[in-house]
């Protein structure tokens, strides 16, 4: 877990130090692109540019307008940070009644004024209801008092949009649907795709070749770097979301008794899940659990 406001401030400071102009509290209400450039309405101003990058998170109004499409798969999330009188350890909760298609979490957070817990869920439907049940499930253990505060709700993309480039336009990170299908994490892929987009943008601006044919290089590069990883994670997601609660419990029991943890230690990487996924699919006891669940 990271302190997201502090992380965003650090990124903003680095951008400004590199020469970027930052407009806080300003919303882009419209975006128009023609042969002369990009025209963005920002508050009461119109900003002119040669190239635009969509880095607007899981908000897809401009993607729909410019034919980029929508993420192939998405979940709903609900999360809130609450004061905790008795901070505990990180908790992950699984199950069809807990968070269908996803999972729930409780993560301790230390603040200058005391302890907090970040409680959240990612689910295929009824994220607010799943969140409320999660709060009640862990509330006594964490010493929660303000249990009625509403969570912050968002859409969580789990697959890329149809196209991430166009004339004078590219989409990165969550705005492109580049998120881990396994956990929903997106910061790493936002940074990777932003770096690739920046490299393509520098070349395109220097040569004044800003059409879709030129900017297509960006999508080819991120697909070459990330497609195999996304495919493996999506394959695991499709298998795991078909499991019964009993099969999920069997996997956790297997981790305790059959040597899965050495495989995890040998292959797991925080931002690269494919080696671990492949190793688990080759592990005979794990394969038996998957087969029984799928055919049963």
Image (cartoon, rainbow, N blue to C red):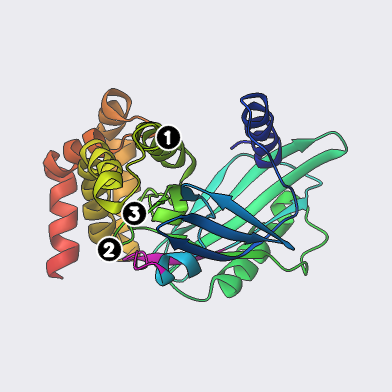
Circle 3 SS class:
loop
**Quadrant of the frame with the C terminus:** bottom left
Residue topped by disc 3 = 164
Disc 2 from disc 3: Cα separation: 33 Å
Tell whether 21 sits left or right of 145. left
**Residue 101 spot, x, y in % from top left:** 38, 65
- N-term-proximal mark, 3 vs 1: 3
Residue range of the region highlighted in magenta in the rendering: 66-77
Magenta-drawn stretch contains 74: yes
Looking at the magenta stretch, what is its main secondary structure? loop
Tell whether 198 sits left or right of 78. left
Residue 283 lies in quadrant:
top left
- N-term-proximal mark, 1 vs 2: 1
Residue topped by disc 2 = 243
Q: How busy is the neighbourhood of tag 1: few (under 14 within 10 Å), some, or many (20 plus)?
A: some
Q: Residue at x 28, y 26 (%)?
A: 262
Circle 2 SS class:
loop
Question: Which callout, 1 or 2, points to the residue nearer the camera?
Answer: 1
Disc 3, disc 1: CB below 8 Å? Answer: no
Q: Residue at x 46, y 47 (%)?
A: 51
Residue 127 lies in quadrant:
bottom right
Disc 1 from disc 2: Cα separation: 41 Å
Q: Can see residue 258?
A: no
Magenta-drawn stretch contains 246: no
Question: Which callout, 2 or 3, points to the residue nearer the camera?
Answer: 3
Circle 1 SS class:
helix
Q: Residue at x 67, y 30 (%)?
A: 16
Residue topped by disc 1 = 198
Q: Residue at x 47, y 66 (%)?
A: 62
Identify whether 88 is placed above or below 19. below
**Residue 105 spot, x, y in % from top left:** 55, 52
């Amino acid at each position: 877990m990271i302190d997201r406001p502090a992380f965003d401030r650090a990124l903003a400071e680095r951008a400004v130090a590199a020469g970027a102009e930052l407009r806080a509290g300003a919303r882009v209400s419209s975006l128009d692109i023609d042969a002369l450039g990009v025209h963005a309405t920002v508050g009461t101003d119109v900003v002119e540019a040669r190239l635009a990058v969509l880095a607007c998170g899981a908000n897809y109004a401009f993607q729909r307008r410019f034919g980029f499409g929508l993420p192939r798969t998405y979940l709903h999330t609900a999360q809130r940070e609450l004061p905790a009188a008795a901070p505990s350890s990180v908790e992950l909760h699984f199950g069809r009644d807990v968070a269908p298609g996803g999972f729930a979490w409780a993560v301790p957070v230390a603040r200058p004024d005391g302890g907090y817990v970040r409680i959240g869920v990612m689910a295929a439907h009824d994220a607010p209801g799943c969140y409320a049940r999660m709060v009640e499930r862990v509330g006594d253990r964490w010493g929660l008092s303000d249990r009625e505060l509403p969570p912050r709700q968002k859409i969580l993309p789990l697959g890329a949009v149809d196209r991430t480039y166009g004339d004078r336009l590219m989409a990165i990170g969550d705005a492109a649907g580049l998120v881990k299908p396994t956990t929903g994490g997106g910061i790493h892929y936002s940074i990777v795709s932003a770096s690739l987009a920046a490299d393509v943008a520098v070349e395109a601006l220097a040569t004044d070749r800003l059409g879709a044919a030129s900017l297509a290089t960006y999508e080819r590069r991120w697909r070459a770097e990330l497609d195999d990883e996304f495919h493996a994670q999506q394959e695991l997601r499709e298998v795991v979301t078909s499991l019964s609660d009993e099969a999920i419990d069997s996997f956790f029991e297997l981790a305790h008794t059959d040597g899965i943890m050495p495989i995890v230690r040998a292959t797991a990487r925080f931002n690269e899940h494919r080696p671990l996924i492949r190793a688990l699919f080759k592990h005979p006891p794990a394969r038996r659990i998957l087969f029984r669940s799928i055919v049963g």
